[in-house]
Image (spheres, rainbow, N blue to C red):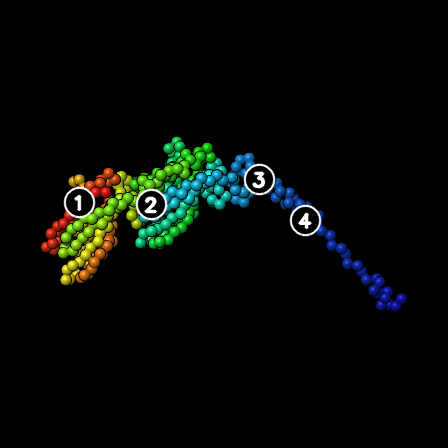
Amino acid sequence: MTPNQAHSSLSPVPPQKHRSPNRVGCILLLVVVLIVLGAAAYAATVLWNVHLPGIGGQPQITTQNLGQTVPYAGVDVTLLNAQQSQSFADDPHTANDGMIRLNVQEKNSTQSKISWSYFDVAQLLLPDKTRVKPAYVKSLVSLAPGVSATNVIDFAVPSSDSISQLTLLLGRDSEAQMNIPLSGKADANQYQPKTTQLQGQALYYGLNWTLKSATASYSIAGQQASSGNRYVTLLFSVDNTLSQEAIVGSPYSYMRLHYGNTSIVPASTTLPVSFETGANNVTGTVSFLVPQNATAFTLILLQQNGFDQASINFHV
C-alpha cells in the first residue's frame, strides 16, 4: 500500500445529518391543529349554519321565473326571476337563515343619462306586512341613453316565507310606488304608460300648433311621480308659416295645464324656444305632474308680446 493509498483510506467519513425531533414534532402538531380547526369549521356550517366563505358551498336554490317589466324613473326594469336560498355564497352581506335574490335587467330608452340606487327605492313586503330593504345590490343604476344592464338585489327574508308570498315595492314611500307580487302571475300593465291619440288645434304666436297625443305615466326621464300623482306628457307638432323666425321662448313661461281649479307649470319639456321660417312638423313634448284621478284638462298658451292666449281641451 502506497502512502497516498493509506491516507485515502483513513479519511474521515462526514457525519449524517439528523432531523431535529423538536422540528418534526412541531410540524405534526401544526397538521393536527389544522385538521381540528377544519373539522370544527365544517361542523359549524352544518350544525349552526354559520356562513364561512369557501366552506360548505352554495345551499340549494329555488327559482321562480317572473318576466315582468315596470318603468321606474325612466328606466324599464324587468324582473327576470326570483331565487330563494338559505344563503348566497357570493353575497358579502348574506344572512344564513334565508335570502331572496332578484335578478333584474334595466334599459334606458330615454335621451338622458339616468342614475339611482335600489338601496333607496326597493323593498320587499313580507306576508306579515313587514318591509325589508336590500341587504346587497350588485351595482348602482347608472345608464347612458339606450344602454341596458343586468343587476342583482338581495334581501334577508326568513326561509319560512316562500317567494310567491312576497311583493316587490318599487319606489320611495314619497313616490308613486309600484307593487309587483312575485307569484309569477302578477299583471304589471297598470304601471305601463297609456297614450291617448289627439288632434287638438290652436293658432298661437303666429304658429300652427297640433296636440297629437297625451301619455299618462308614473315616470319621465330620471324622475318618478310623487305619491298620488302621475305625469301627463303632451306631444306637439308645430308649423311656422310666417315669413320670419318665431321666438316663442320657454314653455315654462307661456304654457300652463288647467284641471279643476288648479293651474300648473310644466315639469319637463323638449320643445324648442324658437321655430325657423318655413319650419314644418317640428315636434316636442311637455310633461306636467297631475293627480292620478284627474282626466279632463285644458292646455293654456298664455298671452305674450301682443299675441292672444290660446287653449286646447282634452281628456286622458
Q: Which residue is mark 1?
A: 313
Relative to 75, say whether 164 is above or below.
Answer: above
Q: Which residue is mark 3?
A: 42
* Numbered tag placed on residue 304 in the rendering: none
Residue name at image x 14 percent, y 53 percent = 204
Where is residue 196? Give x, y as percent.
Answer: 25, 45
The CA distance from mark 3 to mark 2 is: 45 Å
Relative to 276, say whether 316 is above or below.
Answer: above
State yes or no: discs 3 and 2 in contact (Cβ < 8 Å).
no
Around disc 1, counting alpha carbons within 10 Å, would you say few (fewer than 14), some (14 to 19), or many (20 or more)? some
Q: Quadrant of the C terminus?
A: top left
Where is residue 200? Give x, y as percent.
Answer: 18, 48
Judge whether residue 231 can be spotted in this image. Answer: no
Instruction: Please report whichever mark, 4 or 3, sits nearer to the chain's N-terminal start.
Output: 4
The picture quadrant where one finds residue 293 is: top left
Instruction: Please report whichever mark, 1 or 4, sits nearer to the chain's N-terminal start.
Output: 4
Relative to 153, say whether 164 is above or below.
Answer: above
Q: Of the residues shown, which amino acid type is indicated by label 1?
A: Asn
Q: Which residue is mark 4?
A: 23
The CA distance from mark 1 to mark 2 is: 28 Å
Around disc 4, counting alpha carbons within 10 Å, would you say few (fewer than 14), some (14 to 19), or many (20 or more)? few
Q: Which residue is mark 2?
A: 71
Around disc 3, counting alpha carbons within 10 Å, would you say few (fewer than 14), some (14 to 19), or many (20 or more)? some
